[in-house]
Amino acid sequence: MARRSSFRGADRFIGLLTPLVLLGIWEAAARTGLIDARFFPAPSSIVHQFGALIANGELGDNLMASLRRLALGMLVGGVPALFLGLAMGISRPLRAAIDPLISATYPIPKSAILPLVLLIFGLGEMSKVVMVALGAFYPILINTVMGVANIDKIYLDVGHNFRASRWQVFRTIALPGALPSIMAGIKLAMGMGLILIAISEMVAASDGIGYMIWNAWQVLTVDTMYVGLLVIALLGFIFSVILDEVERLLIPWKGNKA
Amino acid sequence: MAVVSRLNAQPKPTAVPAPMQISLRGVRKYFGASGFVAVDGVDIDIPQGQFFVIVGPSGCGKTTLLRMLAGLEGLSEGTMTINRTDPSRPENSMVFQGDSLFPWMTVFDNAAYGLRMRGVPETDVRESVQLWLERIGLWRFRDRFPSQLSGGMRQRVSIVRAFANDPEILLMDEPFSALDEQNKMVLHEELLRIWEASKKTVVFITHSVDEAVTLGDRIMVMTANPGREKAMIDVPFPRPRNVLELRHQPAYGDLVFNIWEQLREEVQRARANAEGDK
Ligand SMILES: Nc1ncnc2c1ncn2[C@@H]1O[C@H](COP(=O)(O)OP(=O)(O)OP(=O)(O)O)[C@@H](O)[C@H]1O
Ligand SMILES: [Mg+2]
């Protein structure tokens, strides 16, 4: 076990090293005028701006606004997707009834629905939450259905042979059997949520990280734009670390071969 | 027209020969719209406590027959009667062909599955699972997941899962086919030991004639598809059996040879069928 976790540590270290080296090269290039600092400001000036935006509270406010929408959207989209997905995975008729609907609406790019969502939900908080919810809904639903439906039939036979009730089959076989696939869906949903919150805040918000980036473009404070990008990248990284950790806790039987 | 009766224990008249635990009459199984015949009229009587072995070429309907006994598959035709001696215990538990342990449960939880599903109090579950895991030498691996075990250990856990449930009838579908010879030999001895202590009725499927003769009281050889009874052979060796010594006896070799001859015809027929399909 100890060996494994130190391997994980090494992986993470290498993962951090690569961007640091690239940043160093970038800094040098910007300072020597090799690249145009108006478009590619030196990392040090971005960091400086980062500090300033934290100090004046702007970054914190925008970050909180985005996180709130993201969290609400993930809940509003993800929880129904999970339950509907489990139900569809278990019940073949339900799957037959709803599958065509999902297949037909899934390929529509969520960003293309934004104007419609704005029309229906207005410019308030609701439209942003709905956008994230839409983005979270599909991957979680589809992965949950697949996860349950693809459970090896032999496990269900074992359940029946040992006289497990419907609820017991659900709890001891369907749910844990589908969990790896569900987690994969949640990860996809999280990435989708980040994309959609950025886009919808750019178009229709007066706060949030997306708004901050868009506004920076309009007033040409390029440093702030980079800070916004950096924050989104960091969010993506932090979420994936957290979700990996959650996965390790929820699915201990995966990937810890002795 | 198919009839399945799972009868509860009758008040026992004294001095009557052991009742049949399992009776099959004219059991047939068709699959799908094409009416593919998998099992074609099987009559068997298995007395309580017998170790009954089925051998036959691949695809002859052994698993199908066992699944019908387990209630996982319906009969297309015929009657199946299962006489219960103790309705408080589960009727049957199956050791499935191939890997069937839940990957998401530890060895302990897998072994405890049947007991927990029927609501046995947790202290009794613990006691019984510990007993069985100790008996088969896996107690110290109780917290491992199946992915952390060898194939032979996994197979032993699925056997424990069935035994710990304490059913009247054990249905075992090629439980050792994936194992190497040494492991097989050890597990044969283990299985005989725990079976001789429990005296459960066993229906055991195998491809191996050696295994059939080593373990069984009676052996049914099945025909190639569609599966029927080809021969029914009594195994005369006394119990308790010592696996190694048994194989040393001339009578053992004769019996194996005899069964092989019956089987060879059917395996050749199965191959001829397959050629015909091309
Ligand atoms: N659910 C099913 N639907 C259609 N055909 C089936 C089904 N289950 C089994 N069969 C067919 O019935 C025949 C008997 O299958 P079965 O699994 O009982 O064979 P088997 O004797 O156990 O073979 P093996 O020794 O290879 O395990 C095979 O031809 C198989 O293709
Ligand atoms: Mg089989």
Image: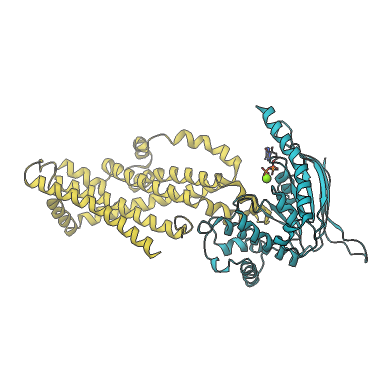
Q: Would you say residue A207 is visible in this rendering?
A: no
Quadrant assignment for ligand 1 = top right
Q: Is residue B193 above or below residue B75?
A: below
Residue drawn where x is 89% and y is 64% of the image: B11
Q: Which colour assignment does the render follow? A: by chain
The location of residue B18, given as percent across then percent down, is 87, 61
Q: Is residue B214 above or below residue B55?
A: below
Q: Is residue A235 left or right of residue B59?
A: left
Count all numbered tags in the image, as a single digit.
Answer: 0
The location of residue B108, given as percent across then percent down, is 58, 65
Quarter location, residue B20:
bottom right
Kindly indicate which chain is depicted in yellow in the rendered structure: A
Residue drawn where x is 20% and y is 50% of the image: A227
Quarter location, residue A61:
bottom left
Q: Is residue B148 above or below residue B131?
A: above
Kindly indicate which chain is depicted in cyan in the rendered structure: B
The location of residue A235, given as percent across then percent down, is 29, 52
* Quadrant where the C terminus of chain B is found in the figure: top right
Find the residue positioned furthest to the left: A32
Which residue is nearer to you in this view: A10 or B238? B238
* Quadrant where the N terminus of chain B is found in the figure: top right
The location of residue A13, given as percent across then percent down, is 27, 57
Which residue is nearer to you in this view: B152 or B16? B152
Q: Would you say residue B1 is visible in this rendering?
A: yes
Quarter location, residue A165:
bottom right
Q: Is residue A68 above or below residue B119?
A: above
Which residue is nearer to you in this view: B153 or B243? B243
Which residue is nearer to you in this view: A251 or A120? A251
Q: Is residue B20 left or right of residue A173?
A: right
Q: Is residue B12 left or right of residue A194?
A: right
